[in-house]
Image (tube, helix red, strand yellow):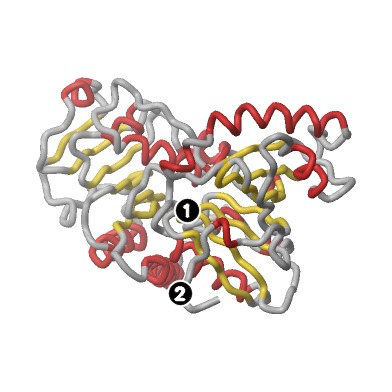
């Protein structure tokens, strides 16, 4: 295969030689997911290469020497991955499923004796991929019924069967452990835009709280009476998420805030420079979605955290056009090093969320 060449699906032989790890990512971020996955695999002692499906939101990882890649799904914590929404391992692509009977060859290709908690039929998160949603729903019922008949579905099983279709005749069957993968189809939590929220950016913080915090952490840390500062708050999408949980928010922005939020009695609007503002006393939460370069946001967040101006923080980093994985990796390493020097024991989490665009969301919490 010539360097830099990405094969079309029709050129990939059925059940490509050797096992593969298939990862889902945001379309356009395939190279960043590939760089991250290669780095992580190398750190776990498995050397390999990635093949990206350009603008298809898919990345395949193969080992150089045929070393099994399935152990990576145990060696690496899924929650530590930034650019990967979902991952699974299988034996490659099954192509040419006959239209008159796709089910028989698919079932024959599954490892005999395997048992799954459930099965998900999925497709790439692209415009073309979404055209497969009706097919996946319909065919999924037939697959589930057939798996039940052969005793391959058990709610107590520890793994899930994923069938990733790129067209109705091409599928990657893969397995993901329930306790180390995304719980959502396609790795995407489906959120509804609240009618009362002043901007769609509210979905970014809602997804961050759902994805980056455990349920017990949300209950313990996001309670009525807690305090927060929202830098770059206007018109109030992130502030709204905090207020609906009963937090008292200082919204810092020279722009106008949503009137209903100000009328809640829980918002203090400060028309000040977000880079200069500091609270008189430490607050529980700092949140920030300012449109600035990471080279400006990271030092600001680091200062708040190391100085003890906030107890925990969630903020977004807008990414450059190139070297996004390296930018995030190096920036988070610098943040962790600064926190360690300051004596604060913090857990730094980061994810490229579905409602993010060219950005990632970082969450910093006191370590348990």
| Residues at marks 1 and 2, CA–CA distance in whole angstroms | 17 Å
At a point 33% along the width and 45% down the height, the residue shown is: 283
Nearer to us: label 1 or label 2:
2
Residue closest to the eye, 273 or 90: 90
Q: Which residue occupies the foreground of this view, 283 or 317?
A: 317
- Relative to 110, residue 47 above or below: below
Residue 59 position in % (x across, y down) = 54, 60
Query: Camera-side residue: 224 or 48?
Result: 48
Q: Position of residue 267 (x, y in %)?
A: 23, 30
Element at label 2: loop
Residue located at (74% from left, 30% from top):
144
Front-lying residue, 80 or 343: 80
Crowd rating for badge 2 (residues with CA inside 10 Å; few <14, some 14–19, many 20+): few
Check if mark 1's residue and mark 2's residue have beta carbons within 8 Å: no
Return the residue at label 2: 4
Residue 99 located left or right of residue 271 = right
Instruction: Read off the residue under disc 1.
Output: 57
Res. 76 image quadrant: bottom right
Position above or below: 108 against 64: above
Q: Is residue 347 above or below residue 236?
A: below
Q: Position of residue 232 (x, y in %)?
A: 20, 45
Where residue 242 sits: x, y (%)? 35, 33
Looking at the image, is mark 1 or mark 2 earlier in the sequence? 2
Residue at the spot 38% in from the left edge and 54% down from the top edge: 360
Left or right of residue 265, residue 113 in this image: right
Task: Please tell me whether residue 53 is drawn above or below residue 288 in the rendered image.
Answer: below
């Amino acid at each position: 295969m010539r360097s830099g060449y990405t094969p079309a699906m029709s050129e990939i032989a059925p059940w490509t030689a050797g096992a593969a790890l298939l990862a889902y990512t945001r379309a356009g971020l395939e190279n960043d997911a590939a760089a991250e996955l290669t780095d992580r695999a190398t750190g776990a002692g498995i050397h390999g290469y990635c093949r990206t499906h350009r603008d298809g939101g898919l990345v395949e990882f193969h080992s150089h020497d045929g070393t099994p890649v399935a152990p990576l799904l145990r060696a690496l914590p899924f929650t530590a991955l930034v650019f990967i929404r979902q991952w699974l391992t299988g034996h490659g692509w099954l192509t040419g499923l006959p239209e008159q009977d796709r089910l028989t060859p698919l079932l024959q290709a599954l490892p005999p004796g395997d048992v799954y908690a459930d099965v998900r039929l999925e497709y790439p998160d692209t415009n073309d991929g979404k055209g497969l949603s009706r097919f996946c729903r319909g065919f999924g019922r037939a697959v589930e019924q057939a798996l039940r008949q052969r005793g391959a579905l058990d709610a107590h099983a520890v793994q899930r069967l994923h069938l990733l279709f790129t067209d109705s005749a091409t599928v990657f069957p893969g397995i993901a452990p329930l306790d180390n993968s995304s719980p959502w189809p396609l790795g995407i939590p489906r959120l509804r835009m609240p009618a009362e929220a002043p901007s769609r950016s509210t979905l970014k913080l809602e997804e961050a709280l759902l994805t980056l915090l455990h349920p017990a952490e949300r209950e313990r840390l996001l309670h009525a009476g807690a305090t927060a500062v929202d830098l770059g708050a206007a018109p109030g999408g992130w502030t709204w998420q905090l207020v609906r949980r009963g937090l008292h928010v200082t919204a810092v922005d020279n722009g106008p805030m949503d009137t209903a939020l100000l009328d809640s009695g829980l918002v203090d609007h400060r028309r000040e420079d977000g880079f200069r503002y500091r609270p008189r006393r430490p607050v529980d939460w700092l949140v920030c979605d300012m449109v600035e370069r990471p080279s400006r946001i990271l030092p600001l967040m680091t200062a708040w955290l190391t100085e003890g101006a906030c107890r925990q923080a969630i903020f977004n980093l807008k990414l450059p056009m190139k070297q996004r994985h390296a930018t995030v990796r190096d920036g988070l390493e610098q943040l962790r090093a600064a926190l360690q020097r300051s004596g604060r024991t913090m857990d730094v989490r980061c994810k490229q969320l579905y409602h993010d665009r060219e950005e990632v969301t970082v969450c910093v919490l006191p370590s348990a």
